[in-house]
Amino acid sequence: MRNYVKVKNLYLSGGMPRSASTWLFNAIRLILLSSPSIKKNFSSGWIHDNIPPKLYTLLKTHSFNEPLINRAKLVAYSFRDVRDAVSSAKRKFGREPTVEWCTKWIALHEYWIKKAHIIMRYEDMLVDKRPFVEQISNHLGIKVNPNDIIDQTLQLPKDPKNVKGVHNKVTLYHPNHITDGKHGTWKHTLNPSLIKAIETKHKEWFEQNNYSL
């Protein structure tokens, strides 16, 4: 992986896996590209894709890299009811979730929320995307029409056919990226004993974030 610490204008789009972090990345990307001066010297992508750093570089990541986060001019983070997040991961990747998945994702969540300039709760984004676009725009100091940015994100292909590799290198969407998208799908996806174990171990986290048990 390249060393991005020396990038002059670094932006990070982080997120709990399966929490609309790809939508968040694209909203930031499109806002940055709306600036002609940034567009001339801009690169973006998944941090592990070895993106060539430019004067303005936007990276998406799920891992917490404190030196990069401390360097970034924008740190955005998305999260979701962790039960829905692991349910979505199960549908997408075909792996059976564990309590340890949730423990890891929640531990990372606690680091991210202390550093992020923009925090996007998935369930709120489903209801209204505009406040998050406005927050990003205001933080970057780039004036945009929020509805235009939202329309552009919604027009991006969410099921990129014939893509070389795992994901589209521009939008970062995987084939069949969105598996359902609704809140509460964990009730029909996860084993009841797993649900109980997750809720018991992380009861405080659910309560702090106003998720019902």
Image (spheres, rainbow, N blue to C red):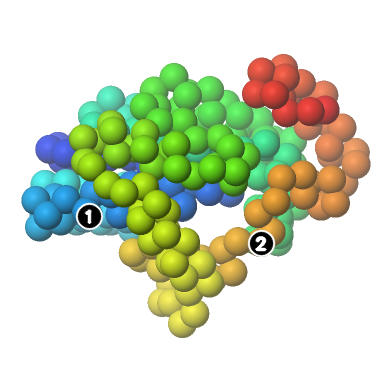
* Residue ID at (16%, 39%): 9
Residue 118 left/right relative to 143: right
The answer to whether marks 1 and 2 mark residues whose Cβ atoms lie closer than 8 Å is no
Quarter that holds the C terminus: top right
Which residue reaches farthest right? 192
Tag 2 secondary structure = loop
Residue of label 1 = 33
Residue 169 left/right relative to 53: right
* Residue 65 tag number: none
> Mark 2 or mark 1, which is nearer the start of the sequence?
1
Closer to the camera in the image, 142 or 190? 142
- Residue 163, image x and y in percent? 43, 77
- Residue 104, image x and y in percent? 60, 33
Q: Write down the quadrant of residue 137 in the picture.
A: top left
Whole-angstrom CA distance, mark 1 to mark 2, is 28 Å
* Residue ID at (81%, 52%): 189
* Residue ID at (57%, 26%): 107
- Residue 72, image x and y in percent? 25, 32
Residue 166 appears anywhere in the view: no
Q: Write down the quadrant of residue 199 in the picture.
A: top right
Residue of label 2 = 179
- Residue 37, image x and y in percent? 9, 51
Residue 10 left/right relative to 184: left
Residue 119 appears anywhere in the view: yes
* Residue ID at (70%, 51%): 182
Packing grade of label 2 (10 A; few <14, some 14-19, many >=20) is: few
- Tell me the kind of residue under disc 2: Thr
- Tell me the kind of residue under disc 1: Leu
The correct choice, above or below, for 46 with respect to 76 in the image is below
Tag 1 secondary structure = helix
The correct choice, above or below, for 2 with respect to 166 in the image is above
Closer to the camera in the image, 101 or 11? 11
